Image: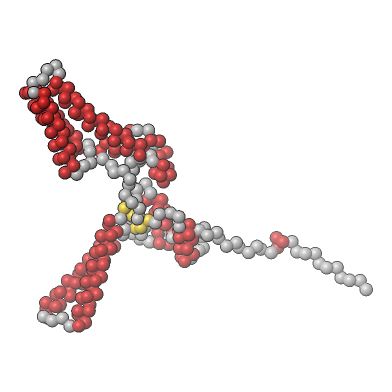
Amino acid sequence: MSSTPAPDAAPSWLYPKAAEPPKPGEILDGMDYSERLWHHTFATQDNDVHFLEYRVLHRLNIFDLQNQLAKLKGACWKDQKASAEDLKMLKNTLHDYTTAIQDYAYMHSLQGIRSSQAPARRRDLSQAFPEIANLPGEPFNSHYCTLGSAPEFQSDPIRDYLKGVVPRHLAYSKPEMDLNMDGYLAKLPPETISPTVDRITRFIIAFAGGAALVVAMLVMSLPFAHKTKSLITVSVAVTLFAATMSLAVRASNSETLVATATYAAVLVVFVGTSG
């Protein structure tokens, strides 16, 4: 009795492969909101968290609570009484009103991100949540904030000028070059002050401060010392020094006053000893 031959195995291409699950952080078409939310959070876990300030929405909430309090005040004045229910509502509304003001003040105090970073953050959110990005009013178009600290080097007119004229590889710090490579390649000035620009500025200020004293003393001493010439020189030098401190250097009122008074005192002492 002959045995029936076993049928040949079907080729593997006849059986469709099961779809592989997406990698963590990979957002694909067809995902629902919960999946997009999880993958977007996973993909950005190593980045600084950037918050949308939503200033108009905060103000809308504050004004609404403010109007509710105004209505409660009007009702109390009209009825000349405040029931337990009215007091409970007043307590809750006052608490919400105070909390809303504190929240607004806190969000307003956060450090804003650089303007070159905002389009990338907006684009990331729009790609991750297109159904929200397509809503009216551009929901992701707001001021972006971060918990990061303020820039290490504060700007002033001298630093702002130098960062636009020094070579780009010196004007850009390494962190900003990594974050704003498009601006670097487009030959745009950086938005922050690099350590090199800060050091150049400090040298210029130190050199100018010493030169302001030496030049004034040379003018008063050469070719001969004369009290009238010395007093005129001191007056002009102090005026120029005060103008430079006020316009070119970012300093407080007290710092400007102390520096100008010290400079004037040194020149006056020189006039007294040389006269």
33 sits left or right of 155 in the view:
right
Looking at the figure, which quarter contains the N terminus?
bottom right
User: What percent of the width, then of the height, locates residue 247?
Assistant: 20, 37
Determine the image quadrant of residue 152: top left
101 sits left or right of 225 in the view:
right
Number of callouts: 0
| Residue projecting furthest to the front | 273
Determine the image quadrant of residue 51: bottom left
User: What percent of the width, then of the height, locates residue 251?
Assistant: 21, 42
Residue 271 in the image: above or below residue 28: above
127 sits left or right of 90 in the view:
right
The residue closer to the viewer here, 245 or 134, is 245
User: What percent of the width, then of the height, locates residue 266?
Assistant: 15, 31
Looking at the figure, which quarter contains the C terminus?
top left
Residue 48 in the image: above or below residue 205: below
How are the colours assigned in the image?
A: secondary structure
| Residue projecting furthest to the left | 228
Residue 188 is at least partly visible in this image = no
Q: Residue at x 20, y 69 (%)?
A: 67
The residue closer to the viewer here, 273 or 173, is 273
| Residue projecting furthest to the right | 1
The residue closer to the viewer here, 4 or 33, is 33
Q: Residue at x 23, y 41 (%)?
A: 250
Residue 16 is at least partly visible in this image = yes
Residue 229 in the image: above or below residue 39: above
User: What percent of the width, then of the height, locates residue 179?
Assistant: 41, 46
The residue closer to the viewer here, 91 or 149, is 149
Q: Residue at x 16, y 33 (%)?
A: 263
Q: Residue at x 11, y 78 (%)?
A: 78
